[in-house]
């Protein structure tokens, strides 16, 4: 009788889990909530966690085996499950749910509408009762600059509450009012009712109603000019200039009636960054960056789901826009729309930005998110304390005799099995040494493991060469004065950089790549050099001769360092391959009679890529200045040959 595949002992019996929508919680032996999730069908969803353990994603398996029990709560609708999931995540802060690590607290512009005479302030506090917020702004000075321009057009109160009370009690203007920096009732220039009307206009303008005010001020300026009231016309002109300055700070990117929030997301296995663009009246009114740490594997749609819940869970209805633009549609988009409509009081649509200006803005947000993700990882590996911790963690995890102060990482890149190149990047003390990066060409190979073996064999050969300037790149003679002799100069040979012995070799890949690297170390007689590989899909760390990988904690500084090494080696290999392909295609095009260097550069610049040039018709090639029909036909037929390199 066959034995069933192992799973966890607390797996519910068949039929115990209902098929209703609901929310579930995994708890550990001490009752702590480890993970909270929702499901339209609890039985179908939870069955994924109780599959045989070897089939689960590594980090999901870690959560399931850490837990000691699972419980669920049935709800009436899918929208109810959304609300309950959000409440429980806020209440229990489960360690295996995505965790938000905001890089910083962003400044906002706030108008204190609950006050008798509302004032405009710069604040990071989002909990002022009755306040209307605009932003966030990337820098504090950006908020102050905007306020300075706005109060020229809408002179509302800027003084403190203490100054306001004193002025209203004594009948003497507040100090900011005396110098023209406060336009509240405390300045003794307007009544409370008149000031409230100006505040309403201020809020309406910031909320996207700029066209109305621009038209009104333009009309007033023309009327005053026609009546030869040039002083009033100049006042209106100055206000228009202030409005233009504010609008120029937030360029119109979408249609003027567009109110939307756009989320650009970049992620890897362990972390994600979110760029949130707040668009009101077609203009980007605020930007917020958020870093998210992931403990278990989730899809892009699930991550978007979590981002939307986190963003709008505590938001007021006025802060929720008509459109939410996302890079991937969550599975429960309809339920999220209903949930948002209940909070906003009006319809909200969730859309994927696929074309036009929205798509271009999504690309911008995604690019910013990608850069923020790289910056987040770089800061962790470049910080001295973090670097020290990373090297210590690596020493312990890989059971090394000492911390690996010099690490070399190798990656192989190819194009459909051709144009094979490899890269070597060097980190010393946890920091990149770009002057010691190397790239390799691999002329003949059978697969990635063979390429890796060849490259490592070539690199390790330098460890056995004598310290001679001719043995490696970047060597030479140093002129060093001898302190023991008068007027005598001796020369000392500088050690070849390839001769520096690494404490750790890292390869991009899993068990097969590590075994190929271990074979290269054995054949070179350098088994004293430590070795590991990092597999991208699960971020597993493989050691030679081991049946199972090492799983570093999600928050481990060592894992971030290995990721940085792997990503840098991959980037360097791809860059080298592209440079080679660019030289290759230029060499191929140079074979076409009548096609010189200037025209080759013009072709590549015009079409943007080799792939686009290969797909172009004779007529499209002939449109380029200086390329006639005859030359276009020659280029087209030459590129049709299968040996011509193409883009990745």
Image (cartoon, rainbow, N blue to C red):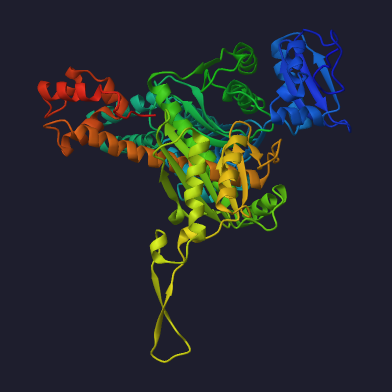
Residue 228 visible? The answer is no
Of 182 and 215, the residue lying toward us: 215
Q: Which quarter of the figure has residue 519? A: top right
Of 573 and 83, the residue lying toward us: 573
160 with respect to 80 (left or right): left
Of 300 and 493, the residue lying toward us: 493
Q: Quadrant of the N terminus?
A: top right
Measured as percent of width and height from the top left, residue 394 is found at 67, 50
Up the image or down, 359 lies above or below 128; here it is above
Measured as percent of width and height from the top left, residue 84 is found at 75, 19
Residue that extends furthest to the right in the rendered view of this protein? 30
512 with respect to 410 (left or right): right
Residue that appears at 43% across and 50% down: 438
Residue 552 visible? The answer is yes
48 with respect to 200 (left or right): right
Measured as percent of width and height from the top left, residue 170 is found at 60, 48
Up the image or down, 222 lies above or below 120; here it is above
247 with respect to 400 (left or right): left
Residue that appears at 20% across and 22% down: 636
Residue that appears at 25% across and 21% down: 640
Measured as percent of width and height from the top left, residue 484 is found at 48, 89
Of 546 and 257, the residue lying toward us: 546
């Amino acid at each position: 009788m066959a034995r069933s595949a192992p799973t966890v002992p607390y797996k519910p019996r068949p039929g115990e889990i209902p098929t209703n929508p609901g929310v579930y919680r995994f708890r550990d032996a001490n009752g702590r909530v480890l993970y909270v999730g929702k499901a339209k069908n609890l039985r179908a969803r939870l069955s994924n966690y109780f599959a045989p353990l070897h089939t689960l994603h590594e980090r999901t398996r870690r959560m399931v085996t850490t837990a000691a029990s699972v419980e669920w709560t049935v709800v009436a609708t899918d929208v109810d499950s959304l609300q309950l999931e959000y409440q429980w995540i806020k209440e229990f802060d489960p360690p295996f749910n995505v965790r938000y690590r905001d890089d910083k607290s962003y400044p906002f512009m706030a108008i204190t509408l609950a006050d008798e005479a509302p004032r405009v302030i710069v604040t990071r506090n989002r909990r002022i009762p009755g306040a209307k917020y605009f932003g966030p702004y990337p820098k504090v000075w950006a908020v102050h600059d905007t306020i300075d321009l706005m109060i020229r057009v809408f002179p509302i109160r800027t003084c403190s509450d203490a100054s306001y009370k004193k002025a209203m009690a004594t009948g003497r203007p507040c100090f900011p009012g005396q110098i023209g920096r406060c336009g509240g009732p405390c300045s003794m220039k307007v009544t409370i009712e008149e000031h409230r009307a100006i505040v309403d206009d201020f809020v309406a303008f910031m909320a996207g109603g700029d066209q109305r005010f621009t038209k009104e001020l333009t009309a007033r300026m023309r009327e005053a000019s026609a009546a030869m009231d040039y002083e009033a016309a100049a006042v209106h002109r100055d206000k228009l200039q202030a409005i233009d300055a504010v609008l120029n700070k937030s360029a119109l990117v979408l249609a003027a009636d567009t109110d939307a929030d756009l989320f650009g997301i970049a992620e890897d296995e362990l972390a994600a960054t979110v760029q949130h663009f707040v668009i009101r009246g077609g203009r980007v009114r605020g930007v917020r960056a958020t870093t998210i740490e992931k403990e278990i594997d989730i899809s892009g749609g699930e991550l978007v789901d979590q981002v939307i819940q986190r963003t709008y869970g505590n938001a007021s209805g006025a802060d929720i826009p008509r459109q939410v633009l996302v890079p991937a549609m969550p599975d429960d988009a309809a339920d999220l729309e209903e949930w948002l409509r209940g909070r906003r009081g009006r319809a909200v649509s969730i859309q994927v930005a696929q074309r036009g200006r929205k798509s271009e803005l999504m690309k911008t947000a995604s690019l910013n998110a990608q850069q923020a993700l790289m910056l987040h990882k770089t800061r962790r590996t470049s910080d001295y304390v973090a670097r020290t911790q990373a090297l210590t963690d690596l020493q312990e995890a890989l059971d090394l005799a000492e911390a690996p102060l010099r690490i070399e990482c190798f990656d192989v890149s190819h194009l459909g099995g051709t144009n094979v190149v490899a890269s070597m990047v060097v980190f010393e003390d946890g920091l990149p040494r770009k002057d010691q990066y190397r790239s390799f060409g691999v002329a003949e190979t059978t697969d990635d493991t063979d390429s890796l073996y060849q490259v490592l064999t070539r690199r390790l050969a330098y460890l056995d060469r004598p310290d001679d300037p001719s043995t490696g790149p970047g060597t030479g003679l140093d002129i060093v004065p001898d302190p023991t002799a008068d007027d005598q100069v001796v020369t000392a040979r500088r050690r070849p950089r390839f001769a520096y012995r690494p404490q750790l070799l890292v390869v991009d890949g899993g068990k097969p790549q590590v075994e190929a690297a271990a074979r290269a170390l054995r054949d070179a007689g350098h088994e004293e050099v430590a070795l590991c590989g990092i597999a991208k899909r699960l971020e597993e760390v493989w050691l030679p001769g081991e049946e199972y990988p090492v799983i570093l904690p999600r928050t481990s500084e060592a894992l971030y360092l290995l990721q940085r090494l792997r990503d840098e080696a991959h980037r360097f290999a791809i860059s080298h391959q592209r440079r080679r392909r660019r030289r290759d295609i230029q060499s191929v095009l140079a074979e076409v009679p009548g096609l010189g260097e200037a025209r080759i550069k013009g072709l590549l610049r015009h079409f943007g890529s080799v792939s686009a040039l290969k797909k172009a018709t004779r007529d499209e090639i002939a449109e380029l200045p200086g390329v006639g029909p005859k030359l276009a036909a020659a280029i087209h037929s030459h590129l049709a040959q299968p040996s011509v390199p193409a883009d990745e």
